[in-house]
Image: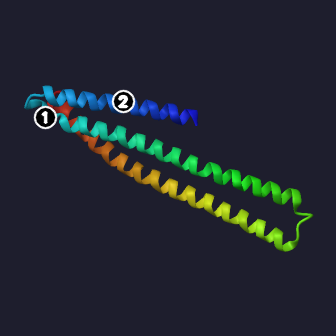
Amino acid sequence: MELLQNTRLNLLRPYSQSLENYKRYSLEASEDDFLFQPRIILHTKLEVLASEMIERVEIQTENLRPLKEERLKLHSFIERFEKWISGEEFREYRDQLFEVQKEIRRERVEGWRDVSNVMRDFLEVWQAYQEARTTSIFIGE
């Protein structure tokens, strides 16, 4: 978790710096400089999308933590007391365990869907950024 937080902070730092640079650049820019403005905007979008991916992974991790704890408790309880509980009670606990496992799978699928949607957007912006970068190199920035 600490690694995710450090990564998130590292991703947000350039975003805030880019935003400040963009504001300063917009105020100081000449008419010729506006040819290069799309590249700066795309760079900022990339940073935002990267931080969104990190945020979604953190949310998924936070959502999975209590579910995994519940699964562990149920699993331990069933293993420990299966000899002493009746068949009906055993089925109830086993069904609860199955439901928690289903919820974990559902959370993982939804989390992956969120991250993959942001990743798709990231790749589209990355392509546009590279095209703008190539254009600016060709023009002679």
Disc 1 + disc 2, Cβ < 8 Å: no
Up the image or down, 88 lies above or below 19; here it is: below
In-image side of 45 versus 69 (left or right)? left
Residue occupying the far right of the picture: 83
In-image side of 23 versus 109 (left or right)? left
Q: Amino acid at mark 1?
A: Phe
**Badge 2 element:** helix
Q: Position of residue 32 (x, y in %)?
A: 9, 31
What residue is at 70 percent from the left and 54 percent from the top? Answer: 70
In-image side of 67 versus 13 (left or right)? right
What residue is at 19 percent from the left and 28 percent from the top? Answer: 25
Q: Position of residue 122 (x, y in %)?
A: 36, 46
Answer with the quarter of the image where residue 77 lies: bottom right
Residue 14 circle label: 2
What residue is at 57 percent from the left and 33 percent from the top? Answer: 2
Q: Earlier in the sequence, mark 1 or mark 2?
A: 2
In-image side of 71 versus 5 (left or right)? right
> Few, some or many C-alpha atoms within 10 Å of disc 2 (few <14, some 14-19, many ≥20)?
some
Q: Which residue is mark 1?
A: 34
What residue is at 33 percent from the left and 42 percent from the top? Answer: 126
Question: Exactly how many numbered labels are in the figure?
Answer: 2
Q: CA distance from mark 1 to mark 2?
A: 22 Å
Residue 65 circle label: none
Up the image or down, 140 lies above or below 81; here it is: above
